Each structure stands twice: as structure tokens, then as C-alpha cells.
Image (tube, rainbow, N blue to C red):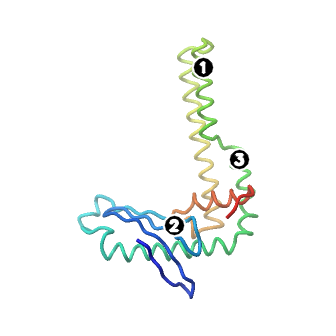
């Protein structure tokens, strides 16, 4: 479903994909790349038999489009400031981050060491668990750094579940990519 509204004289266009219990709204104009999804939990369905398919869905889609526009406008108005602010956070993340590919490569190396007879089964198991715990700890630490940045510098996006989209956009721009 295509939606259009005017906010403070600005034409805002979005698209909503809806089913009875799920909805995703994305903004198409004047900004691109921001979306938000909602789900009606099983426990609430008895009170909302039509779900997102009726008037409630129409109204909620427009509300989400308005929220997306306001968050995107605030972000775009402050890109320069945000790019300056994000730099130390990105440096902290890059020092501790372990990519999924790095994790898989380390697991492969452990398995190969086991196959080559360099590790006993118990040692292999302990090292594999240590690696998994290290990855989990690093991921939690990265999430905390991102949350700290978002809460401090972009609270409107943090509260709207746009956290990952905004973080990726800013890091991409910092690395020389387009907005």
C-alpha cells in the first residue's frame, strides 16, 4: 500500500506491507532507507481481530510513516555532527569486534587442529566453548557501545528500532560511502 502525507509542507511518501498480524512501513520520499516493522503478539490478537488489515492498520501505518520521517529528518539535519561524534565509538567497536567470518575461521582452525591430532577432544571442546563465549562477550560489548552512541546522540532513532539502520548508514558514510 502506497501512502502520502504532508508534514509541515513537506511531501512524505511511504509504502506499507501488511498482513493481519505483521506490518512493515518504509519511507520512500524525501528520504530512503528507513523502515520499521510491527507484529501483533498472539496474546493481543483476541482484542484486535482485524489486526493490521483494517482502520487500525491504516492509522498505525500513517503514524509509523510520520515517525520515520521525523527521525530521518533529524538525522539528515545533523549528519556532520553525527559523523564527528561516531568516530570514537566506531574505533572502540573495531578494536573489539569479531566478525562472523573471523569466528567461523577460528572454529575451522580448531576443528583442523583436532583432526590433525594437535588437540585432544576435551581440549578442543574447552577451546571451542571459550571461543563461543569470547564471541558472545564481544558482541554484547559492541551492542553496548552502539546503544551508548544512539542513546546519547540519536535518541529519536534509538527509540524507534532504527538503531542498526542508522549505525550502518553512519559507519558507511564514515568509511566514504554514500548516505
Residue 94, label in figure: 3
Q: Quadrant of residue 108?
A: top right
Q: Earlier in the sequence, mark 1 or mark 2?
A: 1
Q: For label 2, count other residues whose C-alpha is less than 10 Å away and answer few (under 14), some (14-19) or many (20+).
A: some
Name the residue tied to disc 1.
112
User: Residue lying furthest front in this view?
Assistant: 2
Give me the residue at 58% from left, 16% from top.
114
Q: Earlier in the sequence, mark 2 or mark 3?
A: 3
Q: In the rendering, at what x and y percent does residue 82 appear?
A: 71, 66
Give me the residue at 62% from left, 18% from top.
113
> In the picture shown, does residue 157 fall above or below 143?
below
Measured Cα–Cα span from mark 1 to mark 2: 44 Å
Residue 8, label in figure: none
Measured Cα–Cα span from mark 2 to mark 3: 25 Å
Q: Which of 46 and 9 is in front in this view?
A: 9
- Helix, strand or loop status at disc 3: helix
Q: Nearer the viewer, residue 21 or 156?
A: 21
- Helix, strand or loop status at disc 2: loop
Give me the residue at 59% from left, 51% from top.
143
Amino acid at each position: 500500500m502506497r501512502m502520502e502525507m504532508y508534514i509541515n509542507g513537506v511531501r512524505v511518501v511511504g509504502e506499507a506491507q501488511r498482513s493481519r498480524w505483521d506490518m512493515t512501513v518504509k519511507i520512500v520520499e524525501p528520504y530512503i532507507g528507513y523502515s520499521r516493522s510491527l507484529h501483533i503478539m498472539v496474546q493481543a490478537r483476541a482484542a484486535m481481530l482485524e489486526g493490521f488489515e483494517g482502520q487500525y492498520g491504516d492509522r498505525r501505518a500513517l503514524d509509523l510513516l510520520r515517525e520515520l520521517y521525523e527521525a530521518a529528518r533529524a538525522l539528515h539535519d545533523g549528519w556532520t555532527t553525527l559523523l564527528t561524534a561516531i568516530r570514537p565509538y566506531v574505533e572502540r567497536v573495531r578494536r573489539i569486534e569479531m566478525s562472523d567470518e573471523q569466528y567461523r575461521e577460528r572454529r575451522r582452525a580448531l576443528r583442523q587442529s583436532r583432526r590433525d591430532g594437535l588437540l585432544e577432544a576435551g581440549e578442543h571442546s574447552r577451546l571451542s566453548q571459550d571461543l563461543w563465549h569470547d564471541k558472545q562477550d564481544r558482541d554484547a560489548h559492541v551492542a553496548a557501545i552502539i546503544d551508548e552512541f544512539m542513546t546519547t546522540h540519536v535518541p529519536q532513532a534509538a527509540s524507534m528500532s532504527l538503531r542498526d539502520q542508522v549505525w550502518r548508514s553512519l559507519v558507511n558514510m564514515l568509511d566514504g560511502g554514500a548516505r
